[in-house]
Image (cartoon, rainbow, N blue to C red):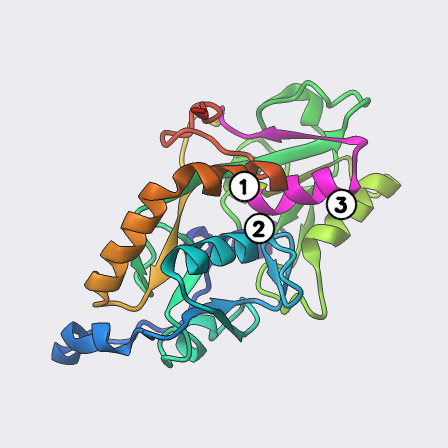
Amino acid sequence: MRSGMLKNRASAVTSLVAAVSVLVPVVCAGPAVAQTSDLVSKTAFRVCADPANLPMSDRSGAGYENKIAELMASKLGLPLDYSWFPMATGFIRKTLQANVCDVVIGYAQGDELVLNTNHYYTSAYVLIVPSSGSLSGVTKLSDPLLKDRRIGIIAGTPPATHMARNGLLPKAKPYHLMVDRRYEDPADEMLADLRSGAIDAAILWGPIGAPLVKASHPDLKVTPLLSEPMLPKLFYRITMGVRQGEKVWERKLNSLIRRNQAEINTILTEAGVPLVNDMGTGPLELRN
């Protein structure tokens, strides 16, 4: 199981989130890329989104990324128009690169498939345990209390490396990474297993796991993993993603993010997303 869980670990950094991005072939950037600013719609705020990816997005508009999209559209004075596609293999190629939409609301900073805006929040992987159990005080994966515990982990994600380093993989339970969440929901399955006692703890990307706990699991405790001393890092900066070459559009979105950061923070905190500082050393100090 250990080799299977660590397979493609390096590529999983940009496909996390929660969640957040997918691994598909990079479209080569040629001379025509400089002209792609003309492809951005002038009549609608066109968003590429997963139709079944709560707590982030869904067709009903209940996700926090839906709410951020609504905010951006309102500030632009444009109607909001979605192109729906599951956040799995082919997502960027069949949405953003196919010019059926102009922005992905949540995308990890540094992925080459898109041009990233400035990041609008930073979050981290979290440890989720019963709030009244013996693991409620655990803050790092090297804690001896985790030895011989069965821990749920999304296979191939960065925390699996830290689990291997601390000898936690032999009893771990892996859950699928690249899925169509219309048919399979690893995060909900993991939390259900935690509630039933099938596993003792769960590790999830914070922007997925923490809002699910806030909405439906009041007896569980969420702790951001901010104390791991070695790589890979467990915190990531989240941006909006646009087509490569769309510098004018990127700058326009950067301006929108900067001017509306307080409202974006409110949406995220109300959803339960754990916000951390840009260096991943502690919680973000929000200003009034």
Residue at which label 1 appears: 268
Q: How far across and how far down the image is residue 29, in percent?
A: 20, 74
Q: How busy is the neighbourhood of tag 2: few (under 14 within 10 Å), some, or many (20 plus)?
A: many
> Is disc 3 in contact with disc 2, using a CB cutoff of under 8 Å?
no
Q: Is residue 208 magenta?
A: yes
Disc on the earlier residue, 1 or 2:
2
Write down the quadrant of residue 217 in the picture: top right
Residue at which label 2 appears: 64
Q: CA distance from mark 1 to mark 2?
A: 7 Å
Which region is colored magenta? Answer: 207-227
Look at 49% across and 44% down and name the residue there: 158
Up/down of 176 relative to 132, above or below: below
Look at 69% across and 27% down and name the residue there: 147
Q: How far across and how far down the image is residue 185, in percent?
A: 70, 60
User: Along the line of sight, which residue is nearer the eye, 269 or 245?
Assistant: 269
Q: How busy is the neighbourhood of tag 3: few (under 14 within 10 Å), some, or many (20 plus)?
A: many
